[in-house]
Image (cartoon, rainbow, N blue to C red):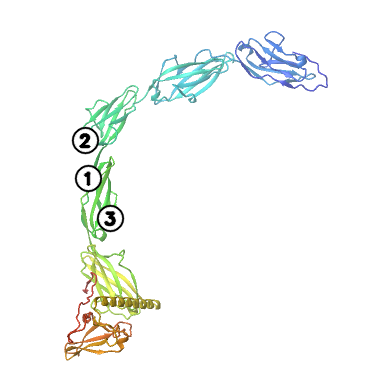
Amino acid sequence: MREVLLAQTTPAPVFLEEPADQEVNPGDTADLKCRLNQPVTVIWLKDGNIQNVGNGGVYTYVGDSATSNEHTIRISGITVDRDDGVWECQALIPGTTGALRSRKARLVVRVPPRDRPSLQLGGSPLRNGDDLQVRSDLNATVACIARDSNPPASLKWWIGTKDVTDSAATINQTSQGGKLYNTVSTLTYQFMPLDNGGQLKCEINHPALAGSLSSYAHLNVLYAPIVTVEQNPTGDLLEGQDVTLSCYAPANPPSTVKWYHDGAELPMINSSSFSLEKITHEVNGNYTCMARNPGFEPVRTVYQLGVRYSPTFIVQPHGDTVDLEQQLTLFCDAVGNPTPSIQWFQNTTDGQRLTRGTDRNLSITADYSSQGKYWCRASNTINDKENIVLSDVAELFVKGPPKFDTTSGNQRNEVIADRGSDSILSAVYCSQPVPTNEYWQREQRPNEKPKPIVPISSNSPKYQIYRKELSRPGCYESRLKVLQVDQTDAGRYKLWVENEKGSSTNLVVLSVREASYTSVIVGVVVGVGSALILAIVAVFCCYRTKRFCFASKKSFSNGDVEKREMKVENGEMVRSVQKDDNLKQNPLQTESIFTRTEKKANGNANGGVHHVISNGNDLPKKSANGRVDERPAEVLHYAQLDVDGPMDDERSTPRMDRERHDNHNGYTDIRPTVL
């Protein structure tokens, strides 16, 4: 203890330097710092005990306490038993019983582990280099112990070059009165088959060692067979090739193998490999390699051998006759490798080809559009080549009552017509068997007096009825043409069709609208324009062919234009010729070449009168109700008057070159049968 006198006015002492933690090796020298701001009495303590420090010996002061107030001590020939511990510098405050205490400094005297680490398995010690037998399906617990070191040793675990220390738990236990430590690290680990034959090493690292100390054990990892099957050659196999299957089943202890094909044992094969020559797709299937070794359950691996081959049908569709709206299913299936894809097609009765589906089974709700020929296509691809096979053709027939086709573009449920025009009402239907009866009816309007509803007759001058068979067999279009419609024709028209299976009806509404003023103007303009164009074309053609109504060798000068007239007198056709001054100014105002023949009971001897109608002024006129007063078609003829220069025979008559006949564009005039 050092004593230093302090004046009462001296402030409280303060540490300028304090001892620090240190680690030293045995036999080394260490200095513990302690310096204050003023002279004080200082003592040193180790582990709470006052130490004898002098100017000589093991513990000595370093520095001049009188001038620098330094109380640093030096420890020489350090030993772990004497010097390892916690050191503290205390300054006594004069006039009090208290002391100013420095921080506690830990002086550690390093002591390396006594020997290389020891290994234990389940509490049983292992010598360095012994075999360590473990199972791959269980966790193993291995301990590593480093004894009598200070500070505690650091332990690491290695499997080969793989650090597995994270799977270990470490504790430190004191020994030799608490001055040294035993370090115990316990590794809990599930070893893998790949670890078999390797080394498990426990390694000590300590600051008192120049290197490291370690112990190791050889790993003997027991594991069940690991089974794999390989094919040679690899890749796609084609029929006619040779192939070898090999089973690899490494295990510890070693294993034996057996082969199975689709569950049946192949007793003739007693090796891990076998070959098949000139294979076909019949050898396809599941090949199982089963491996067994002592101490473990058998292990199986299944290998699917797939010889590539084109599709082959195992189910094909069959034709049938079904009722309308009946549910039916067509079946088609094929085998092949790769598995074939299926596609259904229908050749309809009107010549179309439709794609109907890609499932093995094709479900159909029978309709007239379902009729036709069905077939399926199976295909797969081998080595970038598509293989296609076609099934048999199944023909489907549908029978039932007539059914109207509401999707047809020719059919409209409502028709709007201008007054005075002709309107066509149409309906499309299919019927198998063929229809036995068909007629149109007009329903009564609410404001009409009740009367029996009768079929519309095709003999009526107001209506024309046609039926046309469509390109799809068994399907028809029926048309009702209403002539010169007016408001009294508006209403609901019903088509009734019957066959042996039943009957069906379809309703069409006819609406009549008044022709607008704009429509009339447009009609007149179009008519006049068309007539003018036709007139120009006619004059041009007549002029070029010299078939004009006058002599080809005469010009249209004054006095050269004659008015010619033909009439019947006493049963003979007589032509009169006279000059006409009115024609001189406009020689194109000639007689029309349109004639009309009317059969009259009071006519001439030939029963007819021929009229020459000048400039179309005598064309038929509309009656008061807006209809054209026409003659029946059978008494109406159109003729061309062929004039080739002046007539030599005054009794010659115009020649009728052609007649016009109505054509219904494929529609047949039908007569309804009323039952």
Kindly identify which residue carries mark 1: 314
Query: Gap in Å between the C-alphas at discs 3 and 2?
Result: 39 Å
Q: How many marks?
A: 3
Give the residue drawn at x 21%, y 53%.
394
Q: Which of the pair 403/323 is nearer the observer?
A: 403
Disc 2, SS: loop
Q: Is residue 479 left or right of residue 154?
A: left
Kindly identify which residue carries mark 2: 240
Q: Is residue 511 left or right of residue 114?
A: left
Query: Gap in Å between the C-alphas at discs 2 and 1?
Result: 23 Å
Given the image, on which type of amino acid does mark 3 rest? Leu
Give the residue drawn at x 26%, y 87%.
562
Compared with residue 16, is residue 411 higher up or lower down, i.e. above or below?
below
Given the image, on which type of amino acid does mark 1 rest? Ile
Given the image, on which type of amino acid does mark 2 rest? Gly
How crowded is the residue under tag 2: few (<14 C-alpha within 10 Å), some, or many (20+)? Answer: few
Disc 1, SS: strand
Mark 2 or 1, which is nearer the eye? 2
Tag of residue 286: none
Percent coordinates x, y for residue 596 in the rendering: 23, 83
Q: Which of the pair 402/621 is nearer the observer?
A: 621
Q: Quadrant of the N terminus?
A: top right
Kindly identify which residue carries mark 3: 354
Question: Visible in this render: residue 367?
Answer: no
- Mark nearer the N terminus (3 vs 2): 2
Percent coordinates x, y for residue 668 in the rendering: 22, 71
How crowded is the residue under tag 1: few (<14 C-alpha within 10 Å), some, or many (20+)? Answer: few
